[in-house]
C-alpha cells in the first residue's frame, strides 16, 4: 500500500476547507424568525407585520485519488417569498394571504395543457 495516502488534518488547505464548510452550513441552516417575519410597521392604530416563506437547500462533496490529489465543492440556494400580512388593531388580529397571481396562472396553464395533451392520446 502507498504510505502517502494519509493527509495531515492540520494542513492549511484542510483547515480552510473545514472552516468554509462550517461557516457555509451555519449560514444555510440559520433560519430564524427575523427571516420569516419583517419588522412591524405602525400604520395609525394598527400594526402590520409582513410574513414570508423561506426555503433553503445545499450540498457539498469531495473526492480524491490515490496520490492525495483531491478537490471539493459545494453550493446552496435560499429563496423567500411573501405569503401573508398580519394586521393587528383595536378590532383584533387578521391574517391576509398574499396571492402570487403569476404562480397561480402558471399552475393553471400547466394543468390545462396536461389535460389537453392527455385527452389527445
Image (cartoon, helix red, strand yellow):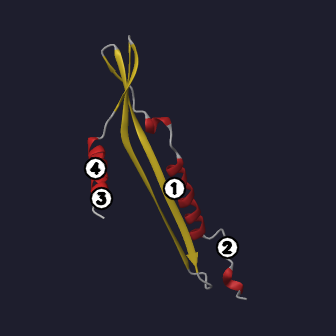
Q: CA distance from mark 2 to mark 3?
A: 63 Å
Q: First in sequence: mark 2 or mark 3?
A: 2
Q: First in sequence: mark 2 or mark 4?
A: 2
In the rendered image, residue 23, in percent from the top left (x then y), is placed at 53, 54
Q: Give the residue at x 56% y 71%.
A: 62
Quadrant (top left/top right/bottom left/bottom right) for the N terminus: bottom right
Which residue has dot 1 on it? 24
Horizontal placement of 17 versus 50: left or right? right
Q: CA distance from mark 3 to mark 1?
A: 48 Å
Task: Check whether the beta carbons of the residues at disc 1 and disc 4 lie within 8 A of each other.
Answer: no
Q: Of circles 1 and 4, which is in front?
A: 4
Question: What secondary structure is marked by label 4?
Answer: helix
Q: Which mark is residue 8?
A: 2
Q: Residues within 10 Å of mark 1 (few under 14, many from 20)?
A: some
The answer to whether 34 is drawn above or below residue 109 in the figure is: above
Q: Of circles 2 and 4, which is in front?
A: 4
Which residue has dot 3 on it? 119
Q: First in sequence: mark 3 or mark 4?
A: 4
Q: Give the residue at x 52% y 45%.
A: 30
Q: Residues within 10 Å of mark 4 (few under 14, many from 20)?
A: few
Amino acid at each position: 500500500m502507498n504510505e502517502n495516502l494519509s493527509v495531515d488534518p492540520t494542513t492549511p488547505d484542510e483547515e480552510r476547507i473545514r472552516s468554509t464548510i462550517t461557516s457555509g452550513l451555519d449560514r444555510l441552516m440559520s433560519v430564524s424568525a427575523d427571516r420569516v417575519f419583517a419588522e412591524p410597521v405602525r400604520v395609525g392604530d394598527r400594526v402590520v407585520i409582513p410574513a414570508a416563506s423561506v426555503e433553503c437547500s445545499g450540498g457539498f462533496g469531495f473526492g480524491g485519488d490515490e496520490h492525495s490529489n483531491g478537490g471539493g465543492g459545494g453550493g446552496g440556494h435560499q429563496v423567500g417569498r411573501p405569503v401573508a400580512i398580519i394586521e393587528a388593531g383595536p378590532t383584533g388580529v387578521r391574517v391576509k394571504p398574499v396571492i402570487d397571481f403569476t404562480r397561480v396562472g402558471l399552475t393553471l396553464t400547466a394543468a390545462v395543457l396536461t389535460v389537453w395533451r392527455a385527452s389527445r392520446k
